Image: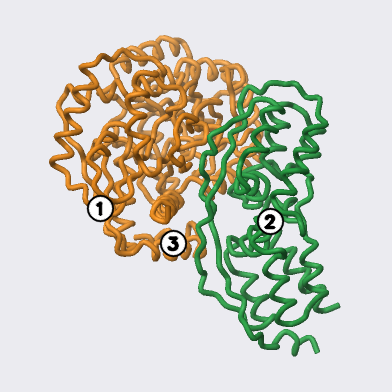
């Protein structure tokens, strides 16, 4: 499986993975998270765990369980850690503790290295018997709701190391080593692998999009953080100059009660604007996402609040010039003027849409540099290597 | 004559190791020149290495015309081009170590009158090297050149930059080996003069090392 990546990352990079993994051979490793599928964490674990086993590291993956009360509490944790606001009471913390105890009694935790992903299972550390414990935080904890962070911090302090996705998410109130490991995309997945021009055009036509005319795409949930109304506004500005089309592709999210409301707001904002396609497809529409990213002349990710925003890397990997919001992990992926453009307002987005659609050579050069930036920094093999190195450094103390 | 020099066998081979430098948040950030100076004074040597020398890897993005993270941030956030260029061009050739580079950058910053407060802070990052044996060995200068032309640049930077600037050796490993095994002082001295701080592409460094070796050997 790992060998397949040689032609993408080169033999030297692959050789480094094998040689670093050699130092970890025979270790037992456990990953613990809160969901077996759906979401970025499960997606990356479904690839990383077999790869680590292939490298001779005995790796297992366990999922904690809980009732609706527990997952409502952890959802509130998640939101309050990312947004800095919250409304939790003592009962919430008791429910969290109760399910940590239940899971600790059910999951064997006797491993050399244990990766705990995100806040949901973080409290398992309290029953630690042996091994090195590493907390992998996939979310933005730079501006958390203080009561929730204080509750979580007392667990995090007990870990041997933690991993954050960006230095921007690092914290100054911890004395645990905070390794910086950005998330990654799998270049061989259905969402990212090469597909034929014929397939791209077939899918575009299926949704009444004309492959011969300029196309702008944004792949995002209908969520205010992704600024869909701002995307429409930027497109309206573009339409005054260029006869382009817009595809905004989202998926219904069962855990997002605001989704439908935001969708309606977007529909209203798009009223009277020609060539706007607001598509709501099932969450597993990976081939369609691939096709709309490849079929686009310019891709947008005009978020006003973002975690890491891996859809940016997905589009960049497909050699697309991306216009992204200047927030969260997007500036790590888009180096303004080199691998894309960062914007703060719809007007700025309109400006760069016009610039890029008028200048094919510029967008091809940016697209090529963007792909190399992703190859160097945001592919899954890099994340695998980073995990191996964090394990090694943690064991060496 | 040249052919025989290239084929001379060393008593000890050059053993090619390589290293990655996983970044670790250093727990401090800066919004102003004063805070930047405070951070530069207090972070460990690995942090200076990471911000000043690690951008030699193209995966560590800085603009082509600025050579290190400090200069990039000063221009982008404090809008001080003149200061950014001075910090960008700080000398890193032998025998400078990260400690001397740290002092030199502080000296440049102390003379600044910039009082701008950045919208986005500078995040100090440090790193921990993860070193591995590539398995490659060179027993002669000829073999050394052959390996150098294809080996991972992680190895070249480890031997040519990291060990020397971190003070693990007083001279880069290539020059030390060429001098010790072949008394090739002219070649060793010329290599020592290459300043790795001004490179922002590892492949350009490789080309420059190889073409210098070729020039000296065939001159």
Pinpoint the chain carrying mark 1.
A
- Are discs 1 and 3 both within one chain? yes
Q: Tell me the colour chain B is drawn in.
A: green
Cα separation, mark 1 vs mark 3, equals: 20 Å
Residue at point 64%, 44% (across, down): B51
Q: Residues within 10 Å of mark 1 (few under 14, many from 20)?
A: some
Q: Is residue B167 visible?
A: yes
Residue position marked by numbered label 3 in the rendering:
A20
Q: Dot 2: what SS?
A: helix
Please report contact status of discs 1 and 3: CB closer than 8 Å, yes or no.
no
Pinpoint the chain carrying mark 3.
A
Cα separation, mark 2 vs mark 3, equals: 24 Å
- Count the marks: 3
| Disc number for residue A111 | 1
Residue B20: image x %, image y %? 53, 56
Residue A303: image x %, image y %? 48, 23
In the depicted structure, whether residue A314 falls above or below residue B148: above
In the depicted structure, whether residue A272 falls above or below residue A186: above
> Residue B218 appears in which quarter of the rendering?
bottom right
Residue A343: image x %, image y %? 59, 24
Cα separation, mark 1 vs mark 2, equals: 38 Å
Chain ID, orange in image = A
């Amino acid at each position: 499986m790992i060998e397949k990546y040689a032609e993408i990352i080169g033999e030297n990079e692959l050789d480094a993975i094998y040689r670093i993994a050699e130092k970890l051979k025979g270790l037992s490793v456990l990953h613990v998270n809160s969901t077996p599928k759906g979401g970025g964490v499960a997606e990356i674990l479904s690839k990383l765990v077999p790869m680590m086993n292939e490298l001779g590291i005995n790796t297992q993956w366990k999922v904690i369980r809980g009732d609706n009360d527990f997952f409502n509490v952890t959802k509130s944790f998640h939101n309050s850690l990312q947004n800095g606001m919250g409304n939790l009471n003592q009962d919430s913390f008791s429910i969290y503790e109760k399910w940590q105890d239940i899971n600790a009694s059910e999951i064997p935790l006797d491993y050399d290295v244990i990766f705990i992903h995100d806040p949901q299972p973080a409290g398992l550390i309290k029953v630690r018997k042996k091994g090195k414990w590493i907390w992998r935080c996939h979310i933005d904890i730079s501006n958390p709701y203080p009561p929730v962070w204080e509750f979580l911090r007392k667990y995090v302090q007990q870990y041997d190391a933690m991993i954050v996705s960006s230095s921007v998410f690092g914290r100054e109130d911890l004395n645990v080593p905070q390794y910086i490991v950005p998330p990654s995309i799998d270049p061989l997945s259905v969402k990212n692998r090469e597909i034929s021009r014929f397939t791209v055009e077939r899918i575009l036509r299926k949704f009444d999009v004309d492959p011969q005319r300029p196309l702008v795409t944004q792949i995002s949930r209908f969520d205010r953080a992704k600024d869909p109304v701002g995307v429409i506004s930027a497109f309206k500005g573009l339409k005054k100059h260029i006869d382009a089309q817009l595809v905004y592709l989202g998926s219904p999210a069962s855990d997002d009660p605001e989704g439908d409301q935001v969708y309606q707001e977007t529909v209203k904002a798009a009223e009277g604007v020609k060539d706007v396609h607001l598509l709501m497809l099932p969450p597993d529409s990976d081939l369609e996402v691939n096709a709309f990213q490849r079929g686009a002349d310019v891709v947008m990710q005009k978020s006003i609040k973002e975690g890491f925003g891996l859809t940016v890397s997905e589009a960049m990997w497909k050699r697309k010039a991306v216009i992204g919001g200047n927030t969260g992990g997007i500036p790590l992926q888009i180096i303004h003027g080199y691998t894309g453009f960062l914007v703060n307002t719809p007007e700025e987005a309109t400006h760069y849409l016009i610039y890029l659609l008028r200048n094919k050579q510029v967008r091809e050069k940016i697209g090529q540099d963007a792909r190399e930036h992703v190859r160097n920094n945001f592919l899954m093999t890099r994340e695998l290597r980073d995990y191996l190195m964090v394990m090694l450094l943690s064991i060496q103390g | 004559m040249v052919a025989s020099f290239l084929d001379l066998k060393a008593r000890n081979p050059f053993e090619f190791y390589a290293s990655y430098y996983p970044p670790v948040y250093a727990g401090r950030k800066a919004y102003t020149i004063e805070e930047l100076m405070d951070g530069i004074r207090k972070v460990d040597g690995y942090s200076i290495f990471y911000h000043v020398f690690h951008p030699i890897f193209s995966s560590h993005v800085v603009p082509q015309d600025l050579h290190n993270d400090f200069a990039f941030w000063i221009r982008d956030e404090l809008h001080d081009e003149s200061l950014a260029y001075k910090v960008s061009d700080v000398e890193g050739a032998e025998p400078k170590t990260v400690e001397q580079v740290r002092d030199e950058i502080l000296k440049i910053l102390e003379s600044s009158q910039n009082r701008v407060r950045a919208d986005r802070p500078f995040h100090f990052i440090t790193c921990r090297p993860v070193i591995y044996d590539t398995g490659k060995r060179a027993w002669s200068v000829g073999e050394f050149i052959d390996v150098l032309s294809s080996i991972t640049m992680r190895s070249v930077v480890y031997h040519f930059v990291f060990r020397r600037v971190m003070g693990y050796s007083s001279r880069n490993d290539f020059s030390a080996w060429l001098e010790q095994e072949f008394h090739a002082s002219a070649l060793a001295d010329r290599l020592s003069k290459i300043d790795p701080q001004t490179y922002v592409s590892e492949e350009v460094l490789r080309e420059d090392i190889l073409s210098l070796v070729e020039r000296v050997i065939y001159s």
